[in-house]
Image (cartoon, helix red, strand yellow):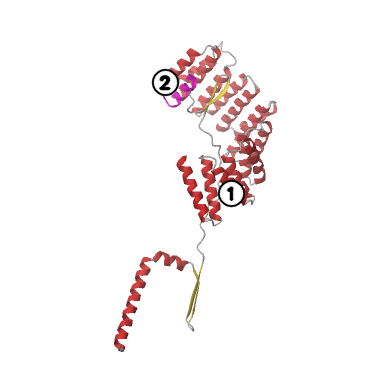
Amino acid sequence: MDPETINAISNLWLLALIVLLIVGVILFYKQIRSALDRLIALRFRRGDTELSSEFAKSPPVEAEPPAYADERATPPQLEVESREESVVVEPGTQSDPFDTMIFAFLRNDILRGEEAYKQLQEAEANAVQKLRNKAVYLYLRYKSGDTSAFEQLQNLAEEENLPSEILPTVYNFIGNCYDLGDNFLKAAEAYEAAAEAAQSEEDRATYIASAAGGLFAAGSREEAFNRVTQEIDKTSTPKALSTLYTELASLYEKTGDSELRAIALEKAIEYQPNDTDLRFGAAYSYSENDLSTLALMHYQTLLEFKPDDTMALNNLGVTYGELNMPVKRSDFYKTASEKDTSRAATLAAANLANEYLKAGLADESSRGLLQLRALAEDS
C-alpha cells in the first residue's frame, strides 16, 4: 500500500475517533462530569507511556437520624362526664341510645341525636341519672351550635332542688362551653365550682386540673402553677395526687421545660406506678434532656406492663442507639416494625431501613423500605 493511501486511512480513523469522542461526551455528559468532580489525582509519565488516575469514592447516601414516636397511638375517643363517673366511648360502639346520641351530635345529625336522647330518657327510671343525661345532652347541643343550650345549662345549675351529686357534672360542662368560646377565665371559675361540689378527692383533683389549665390559657401562668401546688399540699389519695402532678407536668410542657415535666411525671408515677402513659411521658421527657439511661428505665418498665407497645419499642430502639448499643437498637426497631400497621410501626421500619443504609447493607435497606411501603399501604 502506497504512503498516500496509508496517510488517507489514518486521517479517516482520526476523524472517526474525534466524532465518537464528541458523541460520547454528549451521551454520557453527566457520568463524565461526575467522574471529573471526583478526580483527585492524575499522573502522566511520558517515558514508557504511563497514565493513571485516582478518584474519590462516591459520597455515601445520607441516612436520616432516628426518629422518636412523640405521641400515644390511641384511637379517637370522646370523654364525657356521665353515669356514675367519666366514661370513654370509642367510635363504632354505639350499642345504646346514650352512645348513639353522642355520635349523632358529633356528626351534626341533630334529628338522630334528639331521637336518641328521647329514647334514653324514656328508658331511664333513675331521676338523678336523667339529670346527668340532660347535662350531657345540653353540652352536645351547644357544641353543635345551639347557643340557647348554654343558658339552659346555667339554669340547670341554679335549680333549687338540684341534687348535690349532679352539680359537679353540670359545672364541668359549663366550663367546657366556656372553653369552646375561648373564655378561659370563666371556664376556670366553672371548674372551681365543680371542684367545690365534687363528691370525692379524685374528682376534685380532676376539676382543679381543668381550672389550672384554664388559668394558664388565659395568661395567668403563675396562678395556674400555684393553684395546682396548693391543691397538692392538701390532697392525700394516690389517684388524686397523680392527677395533680400530671397536670403540673402538662403546665411545664406548655412552658417548654421538659426537665421539670419529667420530674413532675416521676411524682405522678410514684402514686400510679402502673400507668403506662405516665411512664411514656417521663421517658420521652428524659430523652429530650439527653438522659438516655433514665429514659431506658421507664421504657423497659412500660414494656413489662404492655409488651406490644409499638411506640415504646421504637423509642427504646432510639434510646439504645444513643447509648451506643447498635445491636439492641436494630432488634427493637425490627420488633416494633413487625407489631402492627400503626404510625409508630411505620416509623420503626423507617428507622431500621436507615440503620441498614448507614451500615452499608443496601439489600437489607431495600427490604426495610419495602416493608415500610407495605405498612403505609395497610394503614
Q: Position of residue 344 (x, y in %)?
A: 53, 41
Q: Position of residue 121 (x, y in %)?
A: 49, 14
Q: Relative to residue 137, is residue 10 depicted above or below?
A: below
Relative to the observer, which residue lies in front, 316 or 115? Answer: 316
Relative to the observer, which residue lies in front, 54 or 228? Answer: 54
State which quadrant residue 85 falls in: top right
Can residue 205 be seen here?
A: yes
Relative to the observer, which residue lies in front, 204 or 225? Answer: 204
Which of marks 1 and 2 precedes in the sequence?
Answer: 2
Marker disc for residue 99: none
Q: Is the magenta stretch mostly helix, strand or loop?
A: helix
Residue projecting furthest to the bottom: 2
The amino acid at mark 1 is Ser
Near mark 2 (Cα within 10 A), the count class, few <14, some 14-19 or many ≥20, is some
Marker disc for residue 330: 1
Q: Relative to residue 124, is residue 250 depicted above or below?
A: below
Where are the magenta residues, as a range?
Answer: 95-110
